[in-house]
Amino acid sequence: MPTPPLRRTPIQRRSAERLDRILDACAELLDESGYDELSTRAVAARAEVPIGSVYRFFSNKRAMAEALAHRNLDVYAARVTERFAEPGGEGDWRHAMDVVIDEYLAMKRGAPGFALVEFGMPVPATAAPDQPNHLVADRLRALLADRLGLDADDDRLRVAFLVAVESADALLRLAFRLDPAGDPTIVSETKALLRAYLARTLD
């Protein structure tokens, strides 16, 4: 996994807590005013830290938003892993894919800043080729391969998960364009499409 775009990695607990406050403030401001209006100075004020503390970690607001995206992916993976640990559905990849979609929807509806940044920059067309869906696909492939006893390094599995993530990304964006809470019919069709496609590889 690429490392988040930090100028300095926090070592002490207090420094890590300060970084979390900065990213929390960044997420709140993204919800309130969008990426164009985001500034390092506004984030510092909201986080109640000196502006120098922001620049200690980030060179600009883009780096800050990218770090928030990385944190979002970590949080998402942790939520999926926690759901996988619940009893029921062991070895059932269809249940696992429902969990993957449902936890994404939960973050989309409730995680600060997620509606704009998600796992990548607010303007995906400017992102690097491996951002962000390749990262999501790789993380989910590792999680599900471990749960289902599959070979995470299998090229066929890698391509299948990338296609699945790209397809789900496009369809769920449509769902949220049609309904601020995510159109339930499009969400249901997305799950059906993923089941039909992944059955060729996972059954």
Image (cartoon, rainbow, N blue to C red):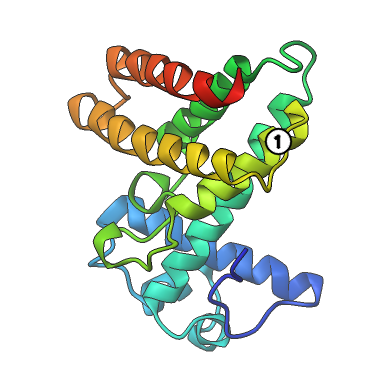
33 displayed left or right of 139: left
Q: Secondary structure at mark 1?
A: helix
Q: How many marks?
A: 1
The image position of residue 92, as x and y in percent, is 68, 15
The image position of residue 161, as x and y in percent, is 51, 38
Residue 56, by quadrant, is: bottom right
**Is residue 24 visible to the viewer in this orientation of the structure?**
no
Residue for point 53% across, 89% down: 52
48 displayed left or right of 189: right
The image position of residue 135, as x and y in percent, is 52, 54
Pick the front one: 106 or 137 = 137
Name the residue type under label 1. Answer: Ala
Label 1 CA crowd tier, 10 Å (few <14, some 14–19, many 20+): some
Pick the front one: 81 or 57 = 81
Find disc 1 in the rendering and name its residue. 145
Above or below for 27 versus 10: above
Above or below for 121 versus 41: above
Residue for point 29% across, 37% down: 170
Above or below for 52 versus 13: below
Residue for point 47% across, 75% down: 44
The image position of residue 72, as x and y in percent, is 54, 51
45 displayed left or right of 70: left
Pick the front one: 14 or 160 = 160
**Is residue 158 visible to the viewer in this orientation of the structure?**
yes
Pick the front one: 145 or 85 = 145
Residue 78, by quadrant, is: top right
Viewport quadrant of the N terminus: bottom right
Viewport quadrant of the C terminus: top right
Residue for point 77% across, 19% down: 86
